[in-house]
Image (cartoon, rainbow, N blue to C red):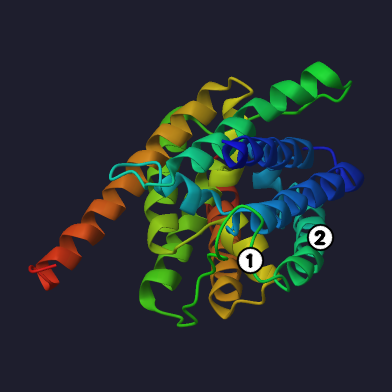
Amino acid sequence: MQRTVLAGVIGVIFGTGIALSGMANPAKVLNFFDIAGTWDPSLAFVMGGALLVTAIGYRLVLHRTRPVCEAKFHLPTSRKLDLPLMAGSAVFGIGWGISGFCPGGAIPALGLGETSAWAFVGAMLVGIFAARSVRLAHSQRLAPAA
Amino acid sequence: MTEFTPVLSLLGGALIGLSAVLLMAFHGRIAGMTGILTGLLPPVASDWAWRAAFIAGAIVAPSLVLSFSNQSIAFASPVPLPWVIIGGLIVGAGVYFGSGCTSGHGVCGMARLSPRSIAATATFMATAIVTVFVIRHLLGDF
């Protein structure tokens, strides 16, 4: 229970950061990418601020043996630059460049009650679900016993 | 045109970083929106409760900012709705296969100097810049 409430509070901090930074504003995000046109470099400051705090904070936190509410840290271990990573990321950038929304920007934008944010998130969830179904079907075909 | 907001953007970025550090410190989890959302889609992950709470907190956050401060939150979308939906489908498939988005790879993974996250971030930033260039300057669209 405590752990769930805490996750909610941390979500509020995340959403506040996104809303203040401009990441939930498609016009601003698209202007960041429009280097040859109406360039708005603000989002470089978002990345800079977020990276600085996270890099320092992670150093302190990951020194501990375990997180406060859990038995262990859940960290990705793969270091391989494979095709799904590279192709998936390239495709994500195209969608981000079309819509001006990334997942972390769009979720807090739902709270602004904007139609485009709801349309984007609905479509994005369909996209994630479809991609996951394709991968699950594929892995079952490769290993039918599993 | 949008207004250049270095101070507000830096502050917002620092809060995003703070949330990433806290989620690691308390829950031992990467604050990546893709991973958190994926666990809420069927088949739903057994640890759905903290995921749902984090998402709910992120959704109510803008209303809290508007209620308890004088800060306004700018929002404008120059993109026609059908293209927003097409963009959403593309983003969903891309972040799933790419194992993350701006928050997971761009902030948390880059902060850990993960080679996968550095490669992913460089790739999606590059294709987003090219996409906007093509739409705005070659096609002359939104």
- Measured in 3D between alpha carbons, the distance from the residue under mark 1 to the one under mark 2, in whole angstroms, is 20 Å
Say which amino acid is labelled 2. Val
Q: Chain of mark 2?
A: A
Using a 10 Å C-alpha cutoff, classify the residue at mark 1 as few (fewer than 14 neighbours), some (14 to 19) or many (20 or more): some
Identity of the residue drawn at 57% across and 27% down: A110
Residue A7 as seen in the image, left or right of residue A93? right
Q: Chain of mark 1?
A: A
Tell me which label, 1 or 2, sits earlier in the chain: 2
For discs 1 and 2, the disc positioned in front in the rendered view: 1
Using a 10 Å C-alpha cutoff, classify the residue at mark 2 as few (fewer than 14 neighbours), some (14 to 19) or many (20 or more): many
Q: Nearer the viewer, residue B138 or B32?
A: B32
For this orientation, the residue located farthest to the left is A144
Mark number, residue A66: 1
Element carrying mark 1: loop
Residue A29: quadrant of the picture: top right
For this orientation, the residue located farthest to the top is B67
Identity of the residue drawn at 63% across and 32% down: B57
Element carrying mark 2: helix
Q: Which residue is mark 2?
A: A53
Q: Position of residue A94 (x, y in %)?
A: 48, 55
Identity of the residue drawn at 66% across and 70% down: B110
Say which amino acid is labelled 1. Arg
Residue A87: quadrant of the picture: bottom left
For residue A101, above or below residue B113: above
Numbered disc total: 2
Q: Quadrant of the C terminus of chain B?
A: top right
Same subunit under labels 1 and 2? yes
Identity of the residue drawn at 38% across and 44% down: B89
Q: Position of residue B38 (x, y in %)?
A: 41, 48
